[in-house]
Image (cartoon, grey):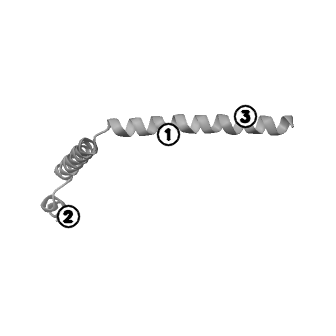
């Protein structure tokens, strides 16, 4: 009998914890604006793209030019 009662208490405790978690998630989602989040993600993606372009451009500027390589082979 005691085992059934403790199992019942455990189930009730888990249900309460799950309800609290669900309420927290619902409240958190209600606070966020999906348009704002999408906008931030797009801005961050553009920044990363721009940084990568600058990185590649800098690498290209630092690498030897083809004409220089050909001249050094002659």
- The spot of residue 10 in percent (x, y) is 71, 36
Distance from disc 1 to disc 2, alpha carbons, whole Å, reads: 70 Å
Could you tell me how far apart the alpha carbons at marks 1 and 3 are, in whole angstroms? 20 Å
Q: Residue at x 14, y 58 (%)?
A: 68
Q: Can you say which quadrant of the picture contains the C terminus?
A: bottom left
Q: Are marks 2 and 3 in contact (CB under 8 Å)?
A: no
Task: Give the mark, 1 or 3, whose residue is nearer the N terminus.
Answer: 3
| Residue drawn at x 12%, y 62% as measured from the top left | 67
In this rendering, the answer to whether 38 lies above or below 14 is below
Q: Which residue is mark 2?
A: 73
Between the C-alphas of marks 2 and 3, the distance is 83 Å
Q: Residue furthest right?
A: 1
Q: Position of residue 4 (x, y in %)?
A: 81, 40
What element does badge 3 sit on?
A: helix
Disc 1 is placed on an element classified as helix
- What residue sits right under mark 3 in the picture? 9
């Amino acid at each position: 009998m005691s085992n059934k009662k403790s199992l019942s208490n455990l189930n009730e405790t888990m249900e309460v914890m799950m309800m609290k978690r669900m309420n927290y998630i619902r409240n958190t989602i209600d606070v966020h604006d999906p348009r704002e989040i999408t906008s931030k993600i797009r801005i961050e993606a553009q920044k990363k793209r721009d940084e990568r372009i600058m990185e590649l451009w800098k690498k290209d500027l630092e690498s030897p030019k083809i004409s220089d390589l050909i001249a050094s082979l002659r």
